[in-house]
Image (tube, rainbow, N blue to C red):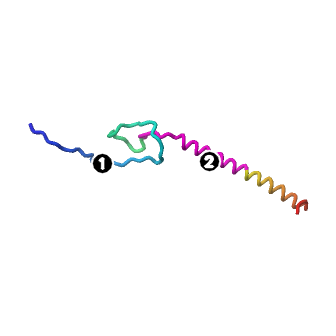
Amino acid sequence: NQTYAGTVVAENSVAVHARVTGYVVEKFVKGGEQVVAGQPLYRIDSRQYEATLANAEAQAAQANANYKNAEVDLNRYETLAQQDAIA
């Protein structure tokens, strides 16, 4: 019997990276485990992104309310202008 030292190298490998940054809160696979395309590997904490989305939605709602108020003002001023009620 003879013993040899060697290194095993995978024939195929791929670099994996997340589309977003954040803290990993759950791991679905182990290192070296075979996976398929589209399979989730990790779950990233989404609270930061949910808060950002809620803030953007609130800003959009505020902008929409401002727009509607401006439309009401415009209609009022147009009516007053037609009646020569404003200079």
Horizontal side of 75 relative to 41 (left or right) equals right
Instruction: Compare marks 2 and 1 and give the one earlier in the sequence.
Output: 1
Q: Position of residue 14 (x, y in %)?
A: 35, 48
Disc 2 on helix, strand or loop? helix
In the rendered image, which residue does mark 2 sit on? Answer: 56
Q: Which residue is painted at 56% across and 42% down in the image? A: 50
- Magenta range is 40-65
Residue at position x 46%, y 39% in the image? 43
Residue 59 on the magenta segment: yes
Cα gap from disc 2 to disc 1, whole angstroms: 42 Å
Query: For the point 32% across and 48% down, which residue is it?
Result: 13
**Amino acid at the residue labelled 1:** Asn
Would residue 38 appear left or right of 81 to someone viewing this image? left
Tag 1 secondary structure: loop
Q: How crowded is mark 2: few (under 14 residues within 10 Å), some or many (20 or more)?
A: few
> So how many labels did they put on this image?
2
Q: Is 1 or 55 nearer to us in this picture?
A: 55
Q: In which quarter of the image is residue 28?
A: top left
Q: Is residue 20 left or right of residue 4?
A: right
For disc 1, the marked residue is 12
